[in-house]
Image (cartoon, rainbow, N blue to C red):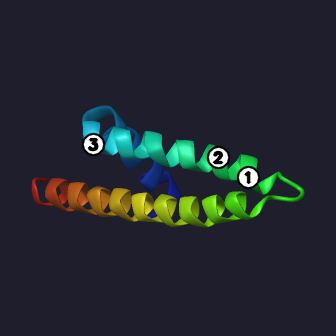
Amino acid sequence: MDIATTDTLKEELIRQDADFRELAKEHGKYEERLSELSSLAYPSDEEQLEEITLKKKKLAIKDEMQSMMSQYQKSHASGH
């Protein structure tokens, strides 16, 4: 799946699927917070731990979104 197809599929699922939309929203929040944390010159131990935890959560959400996109694609490919 190329990037343009992936982006189009994401946009379609964000419009149509409330669960996917919520995952995308959460993924964006994690991305924003990770950006804040990575800009810190001297993060505390707590901030470093938060960064590691958020990266894991963000990756898990990305995997779940990818799975949903694959299922959606398969179900619509067989319908055509």
Q: What amino acid is found at the position of numbered circle 2 in the picture? A: Arg
Say if 72 sits above or below 2 in the image. Answer: above
Local packing at callout 1 (Cα closer than 10 Å; few below 14, some 14-19, many 20+) is some
Camera-nearest label, 3 or 1 = 1
CA gap, disc 3 to disc 1?
Answer: 27 Å
- Which residue is tagged 1? 37
**At 89% from the left edge and 56% from the top edge, which residue is drawn?**
41
Count of marks, rendered view: 3
CA gap, disc 2 to disc 1?
Answer: 6 Å
Residue reaching furthest to the front: 45
Camera-nearest label, 2 or 3 = 2
Q: Which of marks 3 and 1 is nearer the N terminus?
A: 3
Q: CB atoms at circles 2 and 3 under 8 Å apart?
A: no
Q: CB atoms at circles 2 and 1 under 8 Å apart?
A: yes
Residue 10 in the figure: left or right of residue 48: left
Where residue 23 sits in the image (x, y, percent)? 38, 46
- Which residue is tagged 2? 33
Residue 33 in the figure: left or right of residue 57: right
- Which residue is tagged 3? 19
Answer with the quarter of the image where residue 65 lies.
bottom left
Residue reaching furthest to the right: 41
Q: What amino acid is found at the position of numbered circle 1 in the picture? A: Leu
SS category of the residue bearing label 1: helix
Q: What amino acid is found at the position of numbered circle 3 in the picture? A: Asp
CA gap, disc 2 to disc 3?
Answer: 21 Å
Say if 22 sits above or below 68 in the image. Answer: above
